[in-house]
Image: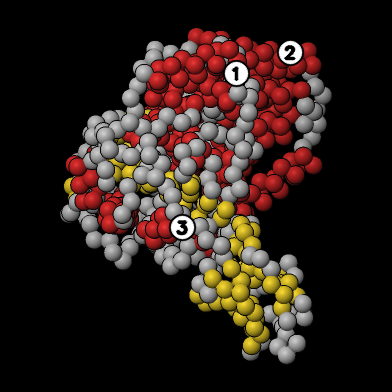
Amino acid sequence: MSSRLHPIRSSFSAFGAWVKATVRRFMAWSDLHPILSLIIISFLLNLLLEILSRRSFDAAFHHLIFSFPVFFYNFMVVLALESISLIIPKHRFVRAFVSGLLLALAITDFAMQSLRITPFSFTDITLLSSVFPIIGKYLNPVEIILIVIALVAIIGLIVFGIIKSKSSKIDWKRGGSFCLITVLLTIGLTFGWLKLGILSGTFNNLVDAYHDYGFMYCFGCSIFDRGISKPSRYSDDMVIQIKSKNESKEMLIDRHPKDSGASDSKNAPNVIFVQLESFFDVDRVKGLTFSEDPLPNFHYLQDTCPHGHLKVPSIGAGTANTEFEVLSGMNLAYFGAGEYPYKTILQGHTCESIAYNLKAEGYATHALHNNNASFYDRNTVFANLGFDTFTSVEYMQNVRLNPMGWARDAVLNDEIDKILDSTTGQDFIYAITVQSHGKYLPDLKDTDQHITVDGLSDEDEKSSFEYYIGQLHQVDQFVGNLVNQLQNRDEKTILVMYGDHLPSFDFQNEDLTDGDRLETDYVIWSNFPINDENRDIYAYQLSAYIMAQLGYSDGVLTKFHQSSINDSDYQQQLELLQYDMLYGDNAALNGKDLKPTDLHMGTEDIKLTGLEYLNNQLYVTGSGFTPYSVVNINDDDAKTVFVDSTTLIALVDEPEAKSVVTVSQVGNDRGVLSTTMPRIYNPAGQ
């Protein structure tokens, strides 16, 4: 056996020796010709980055040939970064570090696009705290371990490189000059290419931007481009002029629809928005047929109610950004590349929204989401968007999970009834579903999955899509049940349902009958007469459109969208108003910011009513408990067993007399969302 393996070992040894010799020769040549070698390395590296980002050799070479000015610009960015090695003594290490870092970013982008379609941006790094609690839904334990090992190995290599790499004398005349010229030329190209329109500072969506402008430029924009840049025409007078013009136009328009009762606060309708995760009409996909209609309820509503396509800012991911556009009426295109306002400006700044606007009409405002409260920091952000209450999965009873571990949407039916029953007046509910969220693995199958798909030749793709269709069908059942329960309530109600983005399948525009993968579907149901016009609109116009259906025009942006949508400078005015309200002088609101609400977690208070120590366990009784309830004794978390909504068991030694006991709702990130009033423990007989 050893004699047969000897030639193989010899071949590997010879190949290894050849590789080492080749690397040494290249490094020696590179030391003699540092500038030329940097140019060659940067060109090849940029080409490799584009291959990974586009996930295609052909697409990358097509970009190189037919979009050469853009390719050249991205090459210059890489060259400028690589040229820093010319002015640092440990130039070999710096060159290897820069090349390795850029490759790691591109490989991450390749992997991210495989999972969710949307490219990798710097914003994703800022979202890590939200991703950690759900990472198990996307990666299996082996993959997570391999990633950790890879990160440790990378850190080790960096440390080893810093320690072991040799320093060399810097050639300031040639190397320093080349570095300076390259950096200045890249900066000049940035401004020149932007002015000529070869590059753009505004991304309508990230997918197309990476395709049009290249990986390095787009990822770089995501690092440095935050918020809304100050428009050149911006001034307080300009904002006041736009606002006054909209108010004058608004007075000329009769906004009260027939019989809505919106003008009568006692007879005003409840307003319910339901944002459906990864939801769209799958009949729009060319060449697919289904063993039965996956969306019978939604299709019935399309046949009988106002509906249309909704233009959203992302595909495959970005739920919070569609949510932001719908709630605020703001166009995300004017924010930074790949930015999530929930993670930036809304962390500490209020924003006009349909919730604030309906509060002005006397509505109680509620957010509802069958996922973790801290995802996208909603438990912080919703106070800055005008919500009175937020019911997240941590406050829900009888939550059932699908095979991916996402909560099934049927739980929201009872929760919506709870909210409507919790007040005597009108309610605005903004519900966000989660059941049909990716990842759609080919080996997943649900218990109630029975609809088959024809038209997909790849078996894994077919299996994945059938799992998605199974989840979508259950979401459609939730939709049908919701309409029925609202129909049976003796309250006027308008219900708006729409998809936040298409699912994370690799759809191209040509795969869809209407040719636009950034369009989802919406429908408006009501139990009173409304305008029955079908219309295709943008997500940031939806709330103003619904407010018009009700005869309301509260809010600066509501008036603006209702009165100025056909103006030739509509988008320029919108950009000015958005900048003013979030980053400028807030002249639109007379210089006064809106006040954040005192956001209450859950519709009802969780109560702690009794304590009893039996059989070496502390029995805690009360109401509203869920599997996310944790018993605290003198501020220390106790190991807690959930029994039912009225009983918890703390596995602890008997507490000392007069110990302070509370119950907290704790999210997957271990953050405390709310805590009950304290109760003092007194041992039996004392």
Q: Which mark is residue 491?
A: none
Q: In this rendered view, identify the residue nearer to me: 450 or 66.
A: 450
Q: Amino acid at mark 3?
A: Ser
Nearest-to-viewer mark from 3 and 1 = 3
Q: Position of residue 640 (x, y in %)?
A: 61, 74
Mark 3 vs 1, N-terminal side: 1
Residue at point 42%, 29% (across, down): 553
Q: In this rendered view, identify the residue nearer to me: 63 or 673.
A: 673
Residue at point 45%, 20% (across, down): 247
Q: Residues within 10 Å of mark 1 (few under 14, many from 20)?
A: some
Q: In this rendered view, identify the residue nearer to me: 392 or 37.
A: 392
Q: Position of residue 549 (x, y in %)?
A: 33, 34
Q: In this rendered view, identify the residue nearer to me: 111 or 546.
A: 546
- Quick check: 458 left or right of 422? left
- Which quarter of the picture shows residue 95? top right
Q: Which mark is residue 422?
A: 3
Nearest-to-viewer mark from 1 and 2 = 1
- Quick check: 321 left or right of 252? right
Q: Position of residue 524 (x, y in %)?
A: 30, 41
Q: How is the image coloured?
A: secondary structure
Q: CA distance from mark 1 to mark 2?
A: 35 Å
Q: Which mark is residue 230?
A: 1
Q: Position of residue 40 (x, y in %)?
A: 58, 22
